[in-house]
Amino acid sequence: MINNFVFVALFLLGFYAILVKKNLIKMVIGLNIMEGAIFYWFITLTDRGGTIPIVNSSQVVTNLNDPIPQALILTGIVIGASTSSFLLTLIIELNKFTSSTNPDQLGGMIED
Amino acid sequence: MSRTKHVITVIVLSLLGVTMLVALNKIPNQFEYANSISQHIVNNAVKETGSLNFVTAILYDYRAYDSLGESTIIFGAVSGIVLLLSRKTLPVSSHGLSFIVKRTFGMLTPFIFLFSIYIITHGHLSPGGGFQGGVILGAISIIFSIVYGSEFDYKRYTPTTKTLLETGGALLFIGLGFLGILFGGNFLMNMRFLNMGEGSLISAGSIPFINTVIGFKIGAGLAIIFYSMIQKTFKEGVDL
């Protein structure tokens, strides 16, 4: 199915960035791509092909999409934004001490 | 990273991808909705909460306690960022853009503010809500500091105002939760006070009020995050 394929491709792209890239900011971008892949998959999985879950007060309710996954994903997006902003802040602070965003050059920091 | 490690990473990731695809294709594409909780919400949410937007009904009525935790996470992130990046004296990061841009955004910014207020207050009637409108509200602070320069944002929308909105929003949210106890229910229970009929602006009990409070809280929180990250506090008395 196409949504599973897109999810796996996006997820592995983000995972690849976290494993391979030598820049902490690019690793945070990879984490965000993984998050976006999970949100996309969760929304497409629960898509019933209906309309948005908003009604008029007089309208008869027929064929609405499931509102629960959308509320859960809204929570997830907000938490993802908070965590990535906090991660970027930690990278800014780290850059002041080491003048580098390479995770391999941070090893000597602890002994000094 | 050497070439061998790179090749090994790609092989391991493609094996993981094949495994995930095989596992995910076993998940059924159609679910049984007949007796599910979402069917209950679709059938009864208007009657039980008064909100026409079911996502808002879930976020601020059925799972309002969860939204309180969510806004606490934002509060924690903002507190951590301010703690890490707090500096007394740092250079000004922006002096503003050209005259044309300033005049254009002078005309646009009131409408952006109006749009964010609309999104926030109509969260129970149309797509939107506190979190979505709050992000637009946070963009106004970013417009101030990029287009008009850091000093304008510092003078017009001071850090004290932002802090008051952020902490006041969080406290008012908890206060609205205690209002549920006051009206004879549980914490954060929607007691359907001030109801002027389904589909009107003042309906659905505490949902529009929680939306408004969260909207200002999120807008101020994002403004504080941006303010801390670009580090635009400046030395007192230095000629700008």
Image (cartoon, helix red, strand yellow):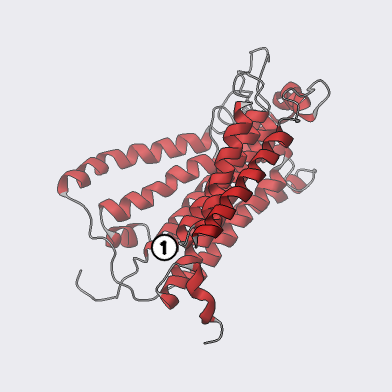
Q: Amino acid at mark 1?
A: Met
Residue B99, position as x, y percentages in the image:
15, 48
Q: Up-down: is B44 above or below A61?
A: below
State the residue at coordinates (68%, 14%): A62
State the residue at coordinates (39%, 41%): B113
Residue A101, position as x, y percentages in the image:
44, 67
* Horizontal relation, residue B155 to residue A82: left or right: left
Question: Which quadrant of the view contains residue B93?
Answer: bottom left
Residue A76, position as x, y percentages in the image:
62, 45
Outermost residue toward the right?
B35
**Is residue B208 visible in the rendered structure shown here?**
no
Q: Up-down: is A93 above or below B21?
A: below
Residue placed most toward the observer, B138 or B77: B77
Outermost residue toward the bottom?
A112
Quadrant of the rendering where the N terminus of chain A is positioned: top right
Residue neighbourhood size for the residue with mark 1, other residues' Cα within 10 Å, grouped as few (<14), some (14–19), many (≥20): some
* Horizontal relation, residue B76 to residue B104: left or right: right
Q: Up-down: is B78 above or below B215?
A: below
Question: Which quadrant of the view contains residue A47?
Answer: top right
Q: Secondary structure at mark 1?
A: helix
Outermost residue toward the left?
B99
State the residue at coordinates (47%, 66%): A91
Residue placed most toward the observer, A32 or B180: A32
Q: Up-down: is B36 above or below B88?
A: above
* Horizontal relation, residue B207 to residue B85: left or right: right
Residue that mark 1 sits on: B229
Residue placed most toward the observer, B240 or B174: B240
Residue placed most toward the observer, A82 or A100: A100
**Is residue B77 visible in the rendered structure shown here?**
yes
State the residue at coordinates (43%, 71%): A95
Residue A67, position as x, y percentages in the image:
67, 29
